[in-house]
Amino acid sequence: MELRHELARRFKEVILNGTFIANTNYRDQLEGLDWKTATKQFDNLNSIAILAQHIHYYIKGVKDAFREGTLTIRDKYSFDFPAIISSDEWEVFLTNFWKDAIEFAQMLEQMPKEKLQEIFIDEKYGTYLLNIESMIEHCYYHLGQIVLLKKYFVVNA
């Protein structure tokens, strides 16, 4: 299997449909989760909704950078989102999250294999490959936080 297809498979594994690494994925954790639980605070930790929005922010931002050749997202804004205050807003967010994740995976599958070794936007960011692998690892990091928060809220419901 070509590396670009393997990267797309690994990305889809953590976001959309896999269970090999973490025995779960974002879709499994977030689909059917009510917006009140998703936005519930525990101490001073980020809510499930904020963590999911944070990951979506990077997926959409890097996807747009792949398409446009400029990186407009900034780390300092990666946790700044308007509050989700209804079930409809939560569902709209999830729809956009899945759509952007699917498009990101498709872009990986279609990316010329030579592109993986090219510099991503600016030399300080490293290669496309480094950024894609970092995206996947970043997703798993926050998926673990979401799983723990969700378990805590279910046990203490």
Image (spheres, grey):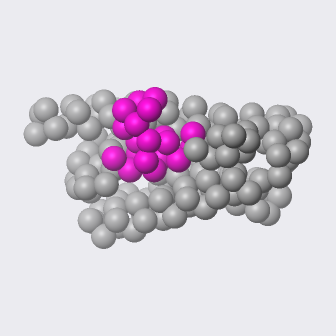
In the image, 145 versus 112, the foreground residue is 112
Q: Position of residue 154 (x, y in %)?
A: 16, 38
Where is 39 relative to 154, above or below? below
Q: Position of residue 86 (x, y in %)?
A: 27, 65
In the image, 49 versus 116, the foreground residue is 116
Q: Quadrant of residue 134?
A: top right
> Is residue 20 located in the magenta-colored stretch of the structure?
yes
Left or right of residue 133, residue 148 in this image:
left
In the image, 147 versus 78, the foreground residue is 147
| Residue under the point 76% across and 62% down | 67
Q: Residue furthest front?
A: 1
Q: Position of residue 71 (x, y in %)?
A: 76, 53
In the image, 112 versus 52, the foreground residue is 112
Left or right of residue 60, residue 14 in this image:
left
Residue 36 showing in the rendered view: yes
Q: Which residues are magenta?
A: 10-28
Left or right of residue 77, residue 81 in this image:
left
Where is 137 relative to 94, above or below? above
| Residue under the point 86% across and 38% down | 117
Q: Position of residue 34 (x, y in %)?
A: 23, 55
Residue 80 showing in the rendered view: no
Left or right of residue 149, residue 10 in this image:
right
Q: Quadrant of the C terminus?
A: top left
| Residue under the point 13% across and 32% down | 155
Q: Quadrant of residue 106?
A: bottom right
Where is 42 relative to 121, above or below? above
| Residue under the point 44% across and 41% down | 18
Q: Quadrant of residue 25?
A: top left
Q: Quadrant of the N terminus?
A: top right
